[in-house]
Image (cartoon, rainbow, N blue to C red):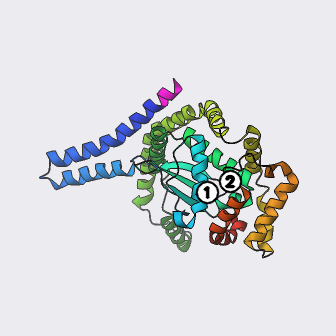
Amino acid sequence: MKRITAVAIALVVHALTLAFVVLGAWTIVVNSAFVFAWLIGGGLIGIGWLLRPRLGQVPADAEVLDRPAATELYGTAERVADRMGIARPKKIAVQDLVPATVYQRVGPLRTPVLVIGLPLWLALPPRRRVTLLALAYARGVTGDDVIVSSALSTLGEWRGALLGSGPLKAREEAQNKITASLGALDSPGTGYEVAGTFGRMIGRVLGAPVLLLERGLTRLTRSGDGPRRERMLTLARRVVPAEDLAELEEVMASTGYLAPMQAAVLRGESVPAIRQGALARFERAAPSVFGSPTATLLGSAESDRIDDELLQHYTRAVRGFGLIT
């Protein structure tokens, strides 16, 4: 029932966005002889465009890898996807300073894309890399609700437009300088402050329903987190054991893998040395992690070839590891 309610609210939001475009086009067509009608209609269409559903895109700081340059990585990602019974990623991208790995569909054609976070990927042994891929795929498939998620993004645009505005910083600084220079004299009054305050009041009045709608839709979405997580784990267990998933989630939450690599970067160690140090720490902490039941999906030799393919990306990424907190 909550799922149906969330979809219904999302469809209302999308219908409202479409109504702006239709009303703007109708205004122009019916009153095409009047310039004022073109201005109003164009404004309405512009509002509809700004509030259009966001269908996702590859992150701006991610670099898409060419298949010929990352054959082993593409092959591994596809083998894991085939084992889980989900769509293979059409593109694989890497992010230098984001540890998380994400599987998502982007664009109007809902193209499946895998975005790998290099900090965590560099630290993981082959078995954990398979677990990371399985977890990313499972999260992406069970959490891909384009209707509701795009409605939330539209409501976020509404909230930002109606409630996120404030006085221009440059204008405030200029006003403060004028007041300071006049000393005890009264500063010249302008209508800027009055108009700005009046506009923010209108924004809060109109934005209150939008804010309530956004919070309600968010709560409806989160109410399904428990069943959604169970579906996610069930899907991931097609490839890896439950204990592997639990151990990887613990590693991801603790970020304890990161500090030794940051220290190694400061010492000037090479990427291969950083990689070997990370593997040695995993072997000391959990020797069983190298006895991989997923070796058919990614063995040590294949994992090493992936590292060779990503070497130049690692080399660039490690320079910024100190910025990760």
Give the residue type at disc 2.
Leu
Task: Tell me whether circle 2 and circle 1 mark residues in contact (CB < 8 Å).
Answer: no
Pinpoint residue 162: horizontal percent, then vertical percent: 45, 47
The magenta stretch is 1-6
Give the residue type at disc 1.
Ile
Instruction: Give the farthest residue toward the front.
Output: 296
Residue visible at 48% across and 38% down in the picture:
148
Residue visible at 80% across and 68% down in the picture:
263
Residue visible at 85% across and 51% down in the picture:
287
Q: Which residue is mark 1?
A: 116
- Residue 98 visible in image: yes
User: Who comes first in sequence, dot 2 or dot 1?
Assistant: 1
Q: Residues within 10 Å of mark 1 (few under 14, many from 20)?
A: many
Q: Nearer the viewer, residue 311 or 161?
A: 311
Pinpoint residue 254: horizontal percent, then vertical percent: 77, 51
Query: From the viewer's perspective, is residue 305 above or below residue 285?
Result: below
Q: Which residue is mark 2?
A: 298
145 displayed left or right of 247: left
Q: Nearer the viewer, residue 268 or 207?
A: 268
| Rendered-image quadrant of the C terminus | bottom right
- Residue 260 visible in image: no
Instruction: Give the farthest residue toward the left.
Output: 33
